[in-house]
Image (cartoon, grey):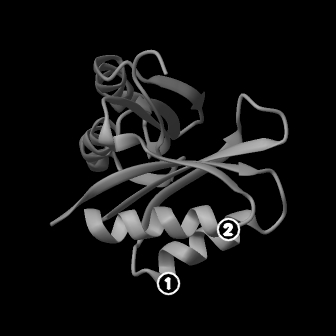
Amino acid sequence: MNRKHTIAILVNDQPGVLQRVSGLFGRRGFNIESITVGSSEEPGLSRMVIVTTGDDHTLEQVQKQLYKLIDVIKVIDVSGNPMVGRELGLIKIGAEPSARPEILGIVETFRAAVVDIGPTTLIVQVVGDTEKIDAMIELLKPYGIRELSRTGVTAMNRGVR
């Protein structure tokens, strides 16, 4: 049965690692819905967080194949345990001065922030889980979304580990 998986992969910070990891997912027929890469707590290592959908058996095979890649240090199915996942969205919307109070009400409700104000536009920053970002986008569509940028999910397991 297909379900959403969030995988954290600790890798050596080397050129070409991202290409090899993403290529492995593609060869196994997994679409990468989201991928983020950044520094980890260990110098010289990066953490990739990949969100994908697939069945458990195939994902297990992908995890085993990932360990065969020379620069992969550790693979964790973060979604297998309670986790915190966050994404950042920047949304530029049409915002004539007369519409701004209504828009600011939406921004406040979502605990988002206005990070830029132009003569006819606003840029809103929202941080949260994917569903929160999706919901905010839907509410801002009537104002005219001019531009949208999302970081993708980054995640880690809850508790002491």
What is the x, y in percent for residue 143?
33, 45
Residue 66 quadrant: bottom right
Above or below, 54 against 116 in this view is below
Dot 2 crowding, Cα within 10 Å, few <14, some 14–19, many 20+: some
Earlier in the chain: of badge 1 and badge 2, it is: 1
Q: Looking at the image, can residue 12 be seen? A: yes
Name the kind of residue labelled 1 in the image.
Arg
In the picture of the structure, the residue carrying the numbered disc 1 is: 27
Image point 32% across, 45% down: which residue? Answer: 137
Query: Residue 44 appears at what percent x and percent y?
Result: 84, 41
Q: In this view, does 51 lie to the left or right of 54?
A: right
Tell me: 102 left or right of 60: left
The crowding category of the residue bearing disc 1, from other C-alpha atoms within 10 Å (few below 14, some 14 to 19, many at least 20), is: few
Circle 1 or circle 2, nearest the eye: 2
Residue at mark 2: 69
Q: How far apart are marks 1 and 2 (CA)?
A: 14 Å
Quarter location, residue 78: top left
Residue 61 as seen in the image, left or right of residue 131: right
Task: Give the position of the N terminus as an image quadrant.
Answer: bottom left
Secondary element at image label 1: helix
Q: In the image, 115: left or right of 107?
A: right
**Count of picture labels:** 2
